[in-house]
Amino acid sequence: MIHYWRALAARLRGLFGDRRVERDLDDEIETHLRLLAERYVRQGMTEDEAAQAARRQFGNVTLLKEVNREMRGIRFIETLFQDLRYGIRMLRRNPGFTFVAVLTLSLGIGANTAIFSVVRAILLKPLPYTDPERLVMVWESSAKTGGEFDVRISNFLAWRDEQQVFAQLAAFQYQDFNLSGGDRRERIQGVLITANLFPLLGAQPAAGRNFLPEEERDGWHRVVIVSHDFWRRRFGDDLRSQDTQGWREKTLTLNGEAYRVIGVMPSGFEIARGGGMPQGLAFAPHADLWTPIHFKPEDRANFSRYPIVIGRLRPDVTMEQAQSAMTTLARRLDPSESSLSVKLVALSEQLTGKVRPALLVLLGAVGLVLLIACANVANLKLAGAAARRREFALRAALGASRLRLARQVVTEGLLLSVTAGVGGWLLAHWLRNLIVVFSPDDLPRAREISLDGAVLGFTLLASIGAGVIFSLAPAARFSRPDLNEDLKPGGGMMTLSLSRLSLGSLLVVAEVALALALSLGAGLLLNSFVRLQRVDPGFDSRNVLTMQISLPQPKYSTGAQMESFHRQTLERVETLPGVEAAGLINELPLGGGDRDFPAFTIDGQASTPGADWFTNSVSVVSPAYFRAMGTPLLRGRFFETRDNEQSERVIIINEAAARRYWQGRDPVGSRISALKAYFFIVVGVVADVRHQGLESETNPRVYLPHTQVMERMKASLLRSMTLVLRSAGPSEPLIAAVRREVSAVDREQSVSNIRTMRQVVAASVAERAFTMTLLGAFAALALLLAIIGIYGVMSYVVTQRMHEIGVRLALGAKSSDILRLVLRQGISLAFAGLSVGLPASLALTQLMKGLLYGVSATDPLTFGAAAALLTAVALLAALVPARRATKVDPLRALRQD
Amino acid sequence: MSKGRYTEAQKSEVLQGTLDLMALKVLDTLGPQHGYGIARRIEQVSEQVLQLNEGTVYTSLLRLQQRGWIAAEWGTSENNRKAKYYSITKSGRKQLGRETENWERISGVIGRLLRLEGQE
């Protein structure tokens, strides 16, 4: 055997390095002829005679070369082409089989290719930064409750000066800007960054320069680097001319101030994007420009700015070392908080950690679909084999080796699967576009999903793998023909059908089991989704319109300026026809943002256990907000206009806070103190709102009236508010009117992020919907393939048992008996598949536990439904062949043999 | 491939099988040789009995090489020409042992058979 492989390897080498080998042989022949001739000359011949004699002695040079060339491998290739030609002829002779097989496999391979391209872009490809594995996100955390929280700017500044574990520590913060200039106003997404952020990532502007450290200082900071897209949109210039002719500076008017454009980032650059951020935070879906995050001296003691911190670990420091060193440092710098700790998360983990389980489940699912497709094609090949059985037996009888016969089968299989691979590749392009278009906004790295060389390699491997897999059963069957039986005219029907049938039945059982697993997965996700939709979010999303209003600096610098804008806007909007209530909130529920409320104590109690920095959230709202959102009041009263700066500070709490801190006592009227300096009277209790996501438990939350925000928090809490409008009918028609009213208050002010509350809810579950839709589609595909598989086998069974059925009918069996006979066989196949598939699925669905909501991975209802569905599918697939069996004409069936 | 060449190839295969064994033996006895040297040695030993198309030696050598029984290396011939020198490998020696045994057994049988037939 070793010799065989070695010769094969030598031949394969011969296929490629042919020309050199041939020259070598020429040289050898030449030397040989010369040596012979010299010998003849020594024996007394003339030069001419000697050369002639030498050629005679040597023999036919051309023939020799040809024989050697053949030995070097041309024969091997010739056989391959022979097999291929033959295979193509066979496929063309059975166009029906070929079409179904290629279509089935194309669907399987296409789905696999598309999902693999997603997995590759999101999970496998390293992030597009220098040494991405050393990049970490840095969060504040609580040693008691865990979790990840954005870093107070005072802490970031202190850490940056004192830390020893990072080569660099950088921060960024999203902020949108009003872009004015000419007659247009535009809302654009900016990111405030430290000057070292781009060097930390290893990114460089495609043109222009990076920020300088001194540009972080207040007053020096009016410089921007813009994205490539924004550059093209705004200036339209070709970037190359900027490069060759030196940087020609442009200016932008942002929030009414002139900023110098100093650089353009390369196309496609983004800091980070993804749904993996801690709850309450989100990466912006895109960025138009970057500008220095500028610090003021007072930021050293500032609690109201929370940048996102990212670091590059020093090469000699591990993640664990860095984490404990940072925690020690953080506590040393801020001894007032003993439970403060620092949590590091690898950037890649942060970005993709949340989508990873869903993607792996999808990848597994398409793998199963491809296996089902393979089983189907193997079955089709077996079923269509009756005619070819004799052909193979004949070839074996004529001396073809088993290996040779198996090779023929596998070559045909590969021909089929590679053709399907081409189809799958084309299909994958379409699927990829579909996936990218319908992917949720926060799917990380979605722009990087492409069908590149690596994906093509995967497709090729999948095609070849599929070809080999579905050829195995037929190859095993064909390469060991039973000569006696197979060569008999019409022979082997009864005896052979047994082995054929058992193999085919096995394949169908496997198909049913695989389809069951997929249906179950899809069923569990669907069940979760439906349950999630039924969750009471704590508000009524019908006829609610929301839009964000961000007030720019320096036009709005003081709290009074912002409050005046808000008051005027609310007054105007409330009176629009059709508007029932209009309110403001700083961070919209399910909008991705949230704020923490400090630890507090209830008067009359020594301490409030569990009321930590990170356990309570706070929202700032205007009086009519709750009515606009439809959040029910459970006790006490809503805020009113009389709750203002002159009156006593009031607060409304949610049910979760009442339950946890008041434990059955009536909170209304009690007084709480926060940070030992601020006192609030509780005036009302409202229903719990699922602020951070439909599936997350509600934590204690307090609401403050927007007119009573402490002066030093105003800038951060009131700058960007979301207007919430409840209308009598559909809310979209109001958009234009609201815009007009906002412009009437401030001609330069724009609104952004206009969405109905329905859309906000849908966006918050978009990722889940996406996974569910894909898995559902794959399950449907699997079911379809299983139907084809069962139908194929049952049809074959009926054909095989035609004789028997004829006898039964002749002996007086009723057609209902025949129907039952065939259906029973179909059902027993399905039951066999279910009995294999159920235990296997129990193990598989455990893997998707993390994706489920409100339903266990072993939910008996879903399991029962999936099993019933597959039984029904099997019945359906067996019905057509069964009905055909009842129409058998006994006379003709008996005459057949 | 035409039928005619198929039979032709089969005929030469018998001869070449023998030639393979001879070439292997020569390389085992004399050490590394080029094709010409092997042809000369066979000519010398066979004492002109065997008429050999010397080109077929190279087909043998290629086959032996493909099976890994001999190895080849470029060197310089007596008349200062580029020549390929062949030497027997370890597995080639093993194969030579097997083939020799096989040959002796078969030639013994054929010899006995021919002698018996001759006596009648």
Image: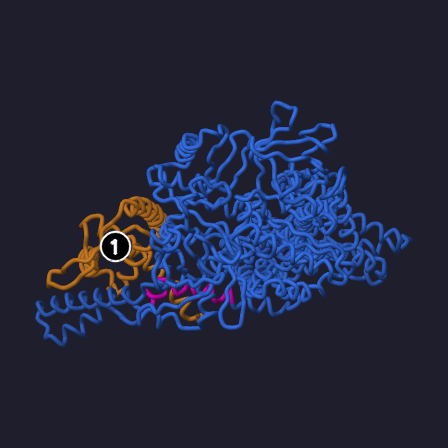
Task: Determine the residue located farthest toward the bottom in the rendered image.
Answer: A48
Using residue A40 as the reference point, say whether residue A517 is left or right of it: right
Q: Which residue is mark 1?
A: B23
Magenta includes A83? yes
Please tell me whether the stretch drawn in magenta is mainly helix, strand or loop: helix
Q: How many marks?
A: 1
Instruction: Indicate left or right for A449 with A636 as reference.
Output: left
Measured from the top left, where is residue A58 in percent x and y?
A: 23, 68
Whether residue A835 is visible here, answered yes or no, is yes
Q: Amino acid at mark 1?
A: Ala
Side (left or right) of A750 relative to A251 = right
Q: Secondary structure at mark 1?
A: helix
Percent of width and height locating residue A147: 54, 37
Q: Residue at x 40, y 52 (%)?
A: A218
Which region shows up in magenta? A66-84
Q: Residue at x 61, y 56 (%)?
A: A565
Q: Residue pushed farthest top?
A: A606
Near-viewer residue (A614 or B5):
A614
| Quadrant housing the C terminus of chain A | bottom right
Does the image show residue A320?
A: no
Mark 1 crowdedness (10 Å alpha carbons): few <14, some 14-19, many ≥20: many
Judging by colour alone, the chain drawn in blue in this rendered image is A
Output the letter for the chain in orange: B
Spot occupied by residue A636 in the image (x, y as percentages of width and height): 76, 38
Q: Which chain is home to disc 1? A: B
